Image (tube, rainbow, N blue to C red):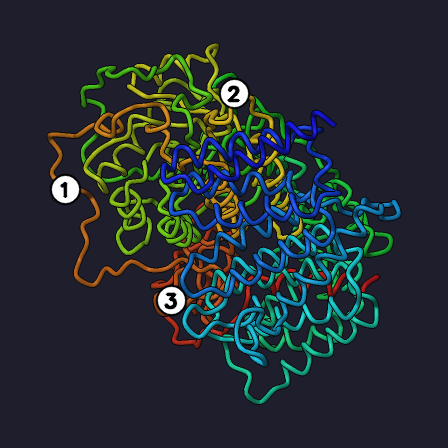
C-alpha cells in the first residue's frame, strides 16, 4: 500500500510539471514518468480509472507540445501506459487520438504515430494459440473505436448535434489522403488480423480501394494502400476473397477506366498474388485476361517466340540469387534438348523470375522445371569454382562453352558471367571476358590528388563500424543511384533528414553515372546540394578482397573520376562492396593509402532479402530490435540499406525515419555522426576543368527517368532499370533480342548483349506506342500459369 501511495504521489507531482514553462523540465518529467510506468508498482493503474485517465490526459497534452523532444518522450510513455489502462480508459484514449487526426490546426502525423505506438504495444493474439483475455479486450477497444474512425464517417464528439467527422482514410479536401492513416490500418491488421470480423475487413477493404480508385491519390499514398490490401487479403474468407475479385473485375470492365486506374488495379492484383499466392492463385484465371490485355497479344507472341529460342538452364539457375549458383552451361546441348511448348517456356521463365520471392532454391527449381516435359534428358549443373582470379592461370578457351577460373577466357568481345546478365557488373567476371566495368569514365585521372590524413576520424587500415555522436542515427544507402533514388530524396526532404549515399559508378546495367542524358548525375548533384553525404562504393561493385592491388585501385580511382566529373570533388569516405576488405589481402592498407575512411555498420536491415510487402516487416523488426537493445537512450547507430530496392524506398525508410524521430534521434550523415566537419568529407581536384570531360552535354541532352514499371518511351529509359536495358518497339524494357533487336528504340535504352555475347545489338528507331503496364504483371502471369499447369 505504501508503494502504491508513493507511486501515486510521484505521478501527481510529475503531471503538474508537464505544464512547466521550461521545456527541459517537461522533458525530464516525462522521462521520470516513463521509469514509473515501467515499474511493477504502477500496475494498480489498471484498477484506478481516475488516475489512469488523468495520466492519459497529461500525455495527450504533451503530444501537442511545441518542442519535438517533449513530444517524442510522450510517445515513448504511451506503450507502457496502455498496458496499465482499464478498458474504458483505453477506449477513451483511442477516441481522443482519432479525433486529433481530423484537426486542421496541428500536425496530424503525431496522433497517427501515437495510435501506431498504442496498437503495437497492446496484447495481441499469438499464432496457433487461442487469444488471451488481454488480447481480446485490446481488440474490443480497437474494434469499438479505432476501426470505425478509420473507415468513417462518425458523429463528431465536439461539434453541434448531427455533424460528422470524416474517416481517417477518407480524402481531406485540403490535405488529400493520409499515408499516416494507412500505416495505422496496416498496424491494426498486422496485430489483430486474426480477430477482425468480416464486416470490419470489408469496411477496411472498401476504404483502401477508394484510394486505389482515385487517380489523384499520389504515388506514396497509393503504394501504402496496395501494401494495406496485401495485408488485409491474408485474413479474407473464401467468400470475401471471391467478392473482392469480382469487384476488381467490375473495375476492369468499367467504361470510365483510366490508364492510371488500370495500372493501379494491375498493381493490386500483383501485390495480392505476391502476398498470398496459394490463396489467391485459383482466382488468377479470372483476372489474367485483363493482365494479358495490358501486355497485348502481339507482344505476348513475341515474348513466347523469344522464350522458345533463348531460355536455357543457365538463365534459369543463374537468375536465382538465393542459391548463389554460378554456372556456365552448354548452350548448344540445352537448345537441342529443350523441346518445350510455348506454355512450358512461359512457365519456366516466370518461375525463375519469382523463385527467390517464393523462397525456393535454384537447384530444386531447375529439377522441377526439367520434369515439366516427360522423358526429358537434362544437362548436369556443374558448379563454377570460385576464388581469386589472380591465383588461376588463364587458359585459352577451346571448344568448351565454359569460362572462368580453371576454364579460361571467353573469345574476344564475349562476356563471362557468374549469374544473371553476362556483361553487367558485378556478375560479369572481369578477368575472363568483356564487361561493362571495363568502360572508363572520361576526364583526367585523380591519382595525383594529394591525400593527407586530416581530422580525428581514423582512415584505413582501420575500419569504422559505429557512430560516436550521441543521439544520432546515420542511415546509409548502397549501390545507387537507381530508379527509386529520386523518390527517396523526396522523402528525405519531407522529413528534413540527412543520409549518406555510397554510390557505385557502373553496375547492374545502369551505365556510367556521369553519362549525359541519364538521370544519375543530376540525382548525385541533388544529393550533394541537399546536404546529404556522397561517398564511394567502388566503380563496379567488385569484391575488394579478391582482386589484385591494381584492380582495387582502379575500382576506387575510376569512381573518383566519375564523381569528380559530376561534383568537382572526390569523397574521402567509402564502403567496400559486400563489406569485404581484409587486412590479409592488403585491401585496408590500400584504402588507407588512397585516403579513405572505411565505413561498415552496426545495423544491417537485410533489406536485400526482404524486398516485398510481405517480407519488409522483417527489416523493420531488425531495426526495432537493435534500438530496443540499447542500454543508453541516446546511443548512436550506423544503419545500412539499399536504395535500389523498391520496398526500402517506399516502405522501410519512412518507417525508420518515423521510429528514430519518435525515439528522440536525428537522422544525420556518417560524417556528422562521427563528428567530422563537412569540409573533410571531400577532396577538391584543383586542376580539374569540367570542359575536359569525355562526355560533354549538348543542348539536346535531357536527363531521362528510369523505368520503374517496365515501360519505356518519351522521357522514360530502360537503361538502369531492373527489367533490362533495351526499349522494344512496343514500349517495353527487356534484355532479349525481342527487345534489343530490330525495331527497338535507341533513345530510350541501349543495346543489350546477346546470350553469351558481349556485343550489343544495334537498335533501330521505332514509333510504337508505349503500353501502360505495371511491374507486377510478370508476377501475376507467373502465378496464373503455375496454377494452370498444376
- Residue at (35% x, 50% y) in the render: 493
Q: Badge 3 is on which residue?
A: 764
Q: Along the line of sight, which residue is nearer the eye, 478 or 377? A: 478
Vertically, is 297 above or below 360? below
- Residue 485: x percent and y percent? 40, 49
Name the quarter where the C terminus is drawn. Answer: bottom right
Q: Badge 2 is on which residue?
A: 388
Q: Going from the N terminus, do you reach mark 2 or mark 1 first?
A: 2
Comparing labels 2 and 3, the label whose residue is closer to the camera: 2
Q: Secondary structure at mark 2?
A: loop
- Using the rendered image of the protein, determine whether residue 113 is visible from the camera's viewpoint: yes
Q: Badge 1 is on which residue?
A: 690
Name the quarter where the N terminus is drawn. Answer: top right
Mark 2 and mark 3: Cα distance apart in space: 40 Å
Relative to residue 715, is residue 753 drawn left or right? right
Vertically, is 329 above or below 613? above
- Residue 731: x percent and y percent? 46, 70
Relative to residue 594, is residue 127 drawn left or right? right
Q: Along the line of sight, which residue is nearer the eye, 190 or 480? A: 190
Vertically, is 142 above or below 200? above
- Using the rendered image of the protein, determine whether residue 315 is visible from the camera's viewpoint: no
- Residue at (37% x, 12% y) in the render: 589
Mark 2 and mark 1: Cα distance apart in space: 37 Å
- Residue at (63% x, 35% y) in the render: 324
Q: Secondary structure at mark 3?
A: loop
Q: Going from the N terminus, do you reach mark 2 or mark 3 first?
A: 2
Q: Going from the N terminus, do you reach mark 3 or mark 1 first?
A: 1
- Residue 542: x percent and y percent? 45, 30
State yes or no: discs 3 and 1 in contact (Cβ < 8 Å): no
Comparing labels 2 and 1, the label whose residue is closer to the camera: 1
Vertically, is 333 above or below 557? below
Amino acid at each position: 500500500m505504501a508503494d502504491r501511495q508513493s507511486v501515486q504521489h510521484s505521478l501527481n507531482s510529475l503531471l503538474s510539471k508537464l505544464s512547466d514553462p521550461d521545456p527541459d523540465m517537461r522533458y525530464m518529467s516525462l522521462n521520470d514518468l516513463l521509469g514509473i510506468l515501467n515499474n511493477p508498482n504502477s500496475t494498480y493503474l489498471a484498477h484506478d480509472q481516475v488516475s489512469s485517465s488523468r495520466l492519459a490526459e497529461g500525455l495527450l497534452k504533451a503530444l501537442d507540445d511545441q518542442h519535438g523532444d517533449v513530444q517524442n518522450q510522450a510517445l515513448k510513455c504511451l506503450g507502457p501506459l496502455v498496458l496499465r489502462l482499464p478498458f474504458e480508459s483505453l477506449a477513451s484514449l483511442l477516441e481522443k487520438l482519432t479525433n486529433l487526426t481530423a484537426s486542421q490546426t496541428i500536425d496530424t502525423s503525431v496522433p497517427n504515430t501515437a495510435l501506431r505506438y498504442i496498437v503495437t504495444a497492446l496484447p495481441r493474439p499469438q499464432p496457433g494459440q487461442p487469444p488471451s483475455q488481454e488480447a481480446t479486450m485490446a481488440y474490443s477497444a480497437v474494434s469499438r473505436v479505432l476501426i470505425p474512425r478509420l473507415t468513417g464517417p462518425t458523429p463528431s464528439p465536439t461539434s453541434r448535434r448531427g455533424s460528422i467527422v470524416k474517416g481517417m482514410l477518407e480524402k481531406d479536401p485540403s490535405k488529400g489522403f493520409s499515408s499516416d492513416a494507412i500505416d495505422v490500418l496496416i498496424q491494426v491488421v498486422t496485430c489483430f488480423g486474426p480477430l477482425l470480423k468480416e464486416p470490419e475487413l470489408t469496411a477496411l477493404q472498401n476504404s483502401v480501394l477508394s484510394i486505389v480508385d482515385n487517380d489523384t491519390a499520389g504515388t506514396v499514398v497509393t503504394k501504402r494502400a496496395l501494401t494495406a490490401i496485401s495485408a488485409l487479403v491474408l485474413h479474407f474468407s473464401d467468400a470475401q476473397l471471391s467478392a473482392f475479385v469480382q469487384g476488381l473485375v467490375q473495375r476492369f470492365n468499367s467504361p470510365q477506366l483510366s490508364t492510371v486506374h488500370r495500372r493501379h488495379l494491375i498493381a493490386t492484383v500483383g501485390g495480392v498474388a505476391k502476398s498470398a499466392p496459394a490463396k489467391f492463385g485459383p482466382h488468377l484465371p479470372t483476372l489474367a485476361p485483363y493482365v494479358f490485355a495490358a501486355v497485348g497479344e502481339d507482344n505476348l507472341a513475341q515474348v513466347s517466340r523469344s522464350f522458345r529460342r533463348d531460355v536455357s538452364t543457365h538463365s534459369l539457375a543463374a537468375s536465382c540469387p538465393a542459391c548463389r549458383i554460378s554456372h556456365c552451361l552448354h548452350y548448344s546441348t540445352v537448345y537441342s534438348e529443350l523441346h518445350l511448348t510455348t506454355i512450358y517456356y512461359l512457365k519456366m521463365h516466370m518461375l525463375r523470375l519469382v523463385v527467390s520471392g517464393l523462397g525456393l532454391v535454384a537447384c530444386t527449381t531447375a529439377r522441377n522445371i526439367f520434369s515439366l516435359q516427360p522423358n526429358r534428358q537434362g544437362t548436369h549443373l556443374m558448379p563454377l569454382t570460385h576464388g581469386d582470379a589472380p591465383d588461376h592461370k588463364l587458359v585459352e578457351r577451346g571448344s568448351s562453352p565454359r569460362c572462368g577460373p580453371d576454364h579460361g577466357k571467353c573469345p574476344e568481345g564475349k562476356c563471362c558471367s557468374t549469374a544473371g546478365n553476362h556483361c553487367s557488373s558485378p556478375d560479369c567476371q572481369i578477368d575472363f571476358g568483356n564487361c561493362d566495368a571495363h568502360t572508363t569514365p572520361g576526364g583526367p585521372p585523380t591519382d595525383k590528388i594529394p591525400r593527407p590524413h586530416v581530422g580525428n576520424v581514423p582512415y584505413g587500415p582501420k575500419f569504422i563500424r559505429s557512430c560516436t555522436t550521441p543521439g544520432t542515427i546515420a542511415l546509409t544507402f548502397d549501390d545507387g543511384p537507381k530508379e527509386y533514388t529520386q523518390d527517396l530524396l523526396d522523402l528525405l526532404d519531407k522529413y528534413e533528414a540527412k543520409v549518406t549515399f555510397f554510390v557505385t559508378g557502373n553496375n547492374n546495367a545502369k551505365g556510367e553515372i556521369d553519362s549525359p542524358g541519364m538521370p544519375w548525375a543530376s540525382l548525385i548533384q541533388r544529393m550533394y546540394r541537399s546536404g546529404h553525404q556522397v561517398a564511394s562504393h567502388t566503380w563496379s561493385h567488385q569484391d575488394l578482397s579478391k582482386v589484385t592491388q591494381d584492380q582495387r585501385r582502379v575500382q576506387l580511382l575510376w569512381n573518383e573520376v566519375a564523381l569528380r566529373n559530376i561534383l568537382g570533388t572526390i569523397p574521402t569516405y567509402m564502403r567496400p562492396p559486400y563489406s569485404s576488405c581484409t587486412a590479409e589481402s592488403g585491401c585496408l592498407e590500400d584504402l588507407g593509402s588512397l585516403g579513405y575512411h572505411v565505413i561498415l555498420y552496426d545495423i544491417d536491415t537485410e533489406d536485400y532479402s526482404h524486398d516485398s510487402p510481405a517480407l519488409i516487416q522483417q527489416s523493420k523488426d531488425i531495426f526495432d530490435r537493435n534500438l530496443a537493445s540499447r542500454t543508453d537512450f541516446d546511443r548512436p547507430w550506423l544503419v545500412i540499406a539499399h536504395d535500389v530496392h523498391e520496398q526500402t524506398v517506399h516502405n522501410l525508410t519512412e518507417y525508420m525515419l518515423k521510429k528514430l524521430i519518435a525515439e528522440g534521434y536525428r537522422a544525420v550523415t556518417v560524417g556528422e555522426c562521427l563528428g567530422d566537419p563537412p569540409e573533410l568529407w571531400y577532396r577538391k581536384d584543383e586542376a580539374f576543368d569540367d570542359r575536359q570531360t569525355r562526355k560533354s552535354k549538348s543542348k539536346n541532352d535531357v536527363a531521362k527517368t528510369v523505368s520503374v514499371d517496365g515501360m519505356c518511351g518519351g522521357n522514360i529509359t530502360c537503361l538502369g532499370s531492373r527489367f533490362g536495358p533495351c526499349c522494344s518497339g512496343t514500349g517495353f524494357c527487356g534484355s532479349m533480342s525481342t527487345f534489343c533487336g530490330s525495331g527497338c528504340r535507341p533513345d530510350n535504352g541501349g543495346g543489350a548483349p546477346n546470350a553469351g555475347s558481349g556485343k550489343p545489338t544495334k537498335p533501330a528507331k521505332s514509333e510504337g506506342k508505349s503500353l501502360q503496364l505495371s511491374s507486377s504483371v510478370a508476377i501475376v502471369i507467373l502465378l496464373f500459369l503455375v496454377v494452370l499447369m498444376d
